[in-house]
Image (cartoon, grey):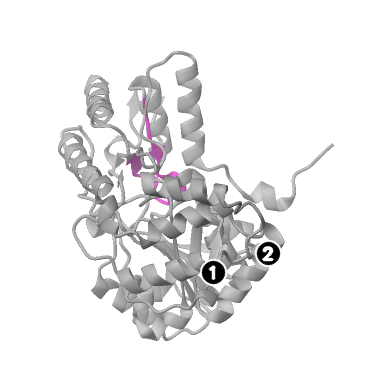
Amino acid sequence: MQKYSDRVNRLSFSQTFVMSNKVREMKARGIDVISLTLGEPDFDVPHNIKEAAFEAINNNFSHYSPVPGFLDLREAICGKLKRDNSLEYLPSQICVSNGAKQAILNVLAAVINDGDEVILPAPFWVSYDEMVKMMGGTSVFIETSIETDFKMTAEQFENAITPKTKVLLYSSPCNPSGSFYTHEELEQIANVVAKYPQITIISDEIYEYINYDGKHTSIAEFPQVYEQTAVINGMSKAFAMTGWRIGYSACPEWLAKGCEKIQGQMTSGANTMAQKASVTALKTDPAEYRYMIDEFRKRRDLVYGLMKEIPGFRVNYPEAAFYFFPDISFYIGKTLNGTIINDADDFAMFLLDHAHVGAVGGVSFGNPNCIRFSYAASEKDLKEAMRRIRECLEKY
């Protein structure tokens, strides 16, 4: 009998993909379901980026690239970090990967040993805890709530540090909450990290551009932790290039070499045509792609108004990304049409079955009292989804 390794048995399937697959199954049976599950922009890739990919194909960029990426792309990433974040990096500090997910895994693999602790402010992206498990580490969770806009304090962070702490891993802007840490908040956290040289910060900034009400700050901007920080970013969210699988890390030299070593034994370099197209994307004035962010802002405001009308929902006003993460603890412990709601995952299944709206429960995000809705969907679908949810809950 074939048996999984302990490594596989430690892992869970991504709840995001579990719910999106259930939506697909229902649609295949002819059920009219609105999916607000996946964090994927519903725009097409901008024309100039596609043209750059065609040009790369015609110029026969179809062979292996250097493991950390083509030099011109790493130079473009350095230029972007200087232009947008006032950060100085050399191409040798950049590792281009098959999506930002691999970039995070590279860093984790490079710095943690079995039993090392990784601090995760909750809520967190569903894959973080599973990545830590995969690398043999142990996650230490810091709870937050809607009252604190789902952000930890520097004091909470310092209280969670032990001799085994090796990594702080977080996203800002945050998936799933849509919150982001201010300059002042990150400075306070940086001051704590600077006291613990064994700690590496993994700062996931993939939603950097989808920020409506404040200037993005990277924690690497604080010189006291520059040498302790791995900045993670990529092409998926700001440029609608989810399927192109280009992410990157910007690290101190020692860590960049470790990431290159690991990636060289795992996947080697990322897709060559997508790399060349990414050069064009990063060198273009970000204002050229602002139309997507402006549309997300309109949808944010639309959904916020409609979601406040849903009974039992407590909603914050997300300032970034394209998610709502309402607190639905009002329904925990209740029975809705014969379904006992033990946590937000049960509530998400109830909405899928009875309102025909797909969302993702907050258990795998580290908060069992909240549920994530993506508003990367048309205004028509968003209006209809909110109507269905409100009428379903009013009924039951």
Disc 1, SS? helix
Q: Is residue 203 above or below residue 273?
A: below
Residue 390 visible somewhere in the drawing:
yes
Residue 249 x %, y %: 50, 67
Q: Is residue 275 above or below residue 74?
A: above
For the point 47% across and 40% down, which residue is it? 16
- State the residue position of label 2: 264
In the image: residue 199, left or right of residue 152: right
308 drawn magenta: no
For the point 26% across and 25% down, which residue is it? 393
Q: Is residue 305 above or below residue 232?
A: above
- State the residue position of label 1: 71
Residue type marked 1? Leu
Judged from this view, the residue extending furthest toward the front is 59
Residue 218 x %, y %: 34, 70
Disc 2, SS? helix
Give the magenta-colored segment's residue range: 357-373
For the point 34% across and 77% down, which residue is it? 221
